[in-house]
Image (cartoon, rainbow, N blue to C red):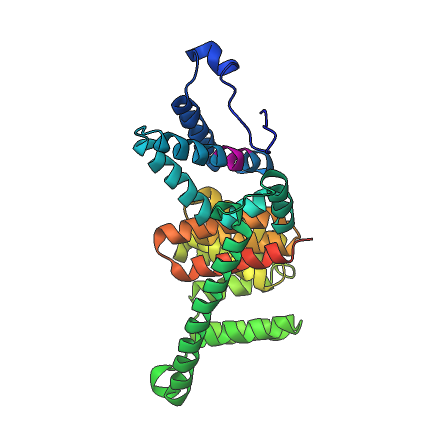
Amino acid sequence: MPYAADGFNTINPVGKLQQNVGALNEGDVLREALAQCERALVTLNADTVRQLLCNLAQAERLVASLQAAGADVRPEALRLETVQTRLLRQPNRVLSAVGGVKAYAMLREQLAPLDRSARWWRLDEVAAEQRKHLWMRLGVVAAVLAGIIALGYLFRDTLFPADPVNDAIFAAQAALSQGEVGIALEAIRSGLEQAPENPALLIWRGVLTASSDSEASARDFDRARAALGELEFLLERASVWLSAGAPERALEDADAAVARAPDRAEAYFLRATAREQLGQRALALQDLERTAELAQASGNDVLFATARVRIGMLLQTAP
């Protein structure tokens, strides 16, 4: 795509477009620039982000010019506002597409060395503001949770009666964090004595015994699958594989869950965690972006916030 001396691409009215539709006026150029912006938003990568920013700047100039000349460009102005709004809502996606904050800053210096007044030229600042607001909201949530926990501790016997299932899982997780697989297995077996048909405990026992007694492990998995259904079983087992330090096995179950239910945010979140543990950072970021989209669409604010925080952390620690 050709670029003018100021760094912005232009739509040449004597080029390919002229061959198809004749001479283009400024309104035609504006509408074509907006169409290219809308297409670029669908598939963001390093090349389309560059194209998007250039065309957006051109469209903004044309709208102002045509309005000053008395032309009615209300539909085009609305399309321009929609493109700008969509861009500002996903700054992290744009930054990720171009390779991070530093790459975006270099691209901005190249395309707009003088005029960066438009907010969409400062998506790195927008992303930082969003992270700041998110951390503030999470701080409020943490403070509220701390108060609830304090009250819960005071009234723990009344509010939180004994829960053999969660107690066993918590004990197993604590033991695994210290590398004590045997102690973790004993905790799960103790929980199963009180809740022998609990599918979560069956999955835990199946995971912890998979290497030593594959037949018994398979039986536990079959019982849990029958109780939960295939999808919930895959999600639960993927989570346990992650707790047990087996991201490869977790990735297999998460892949199967995504294939079975491509609209479940939890499946992408588990797969992102497995991929991050395996060092597949770019793929993990893609899954976290999809997690956030699906969680927001389904009203799962906690998972949405968690996914956005994880995205920010991965971007900040990217090599």
Q: Specify whether residue 196 is painted magenta.
A: no
Task: Answer above or below: position of 31 versus 21.
Answer: below
* Count of numbered circles in the view: 0
Q: Residue at x 66, y 52 (%)?
A: 279
Q: Residue furthest front?
A: 69
* Res 40 visible: no
Q: Residue at x 50, y 47 (%)?
A: 117
Left or right: 294 in relation to 184: left
Q: Position of residue 231 (x, y in %)?
A: 43, 50
Task: Answer above or below: position of 255 versus 217.
Answer: above
**In-front residue for pair 183/66:** 66
Left or right: 157 in relation to 56: left
Q: Residue at x 62, y 71 (%)?
A: 176
Q: Position of residue 200 (x, y in %)?
A: 46, 64
Q: Quadrant of residue 276?
A: bottom right
Q: Position of residue 35 (x, y in %)?
A: 43, 28
> What secondary structure do most residues of the magenta stretch adopt?
helix
* Res 5 visible: yes
**In-front residue for pair 57/302:** 57
Residues rendered magenta in the picture: 51-55
Left or right: 248 in relation to 290: right
Q: Residue furthest right?
A: 319
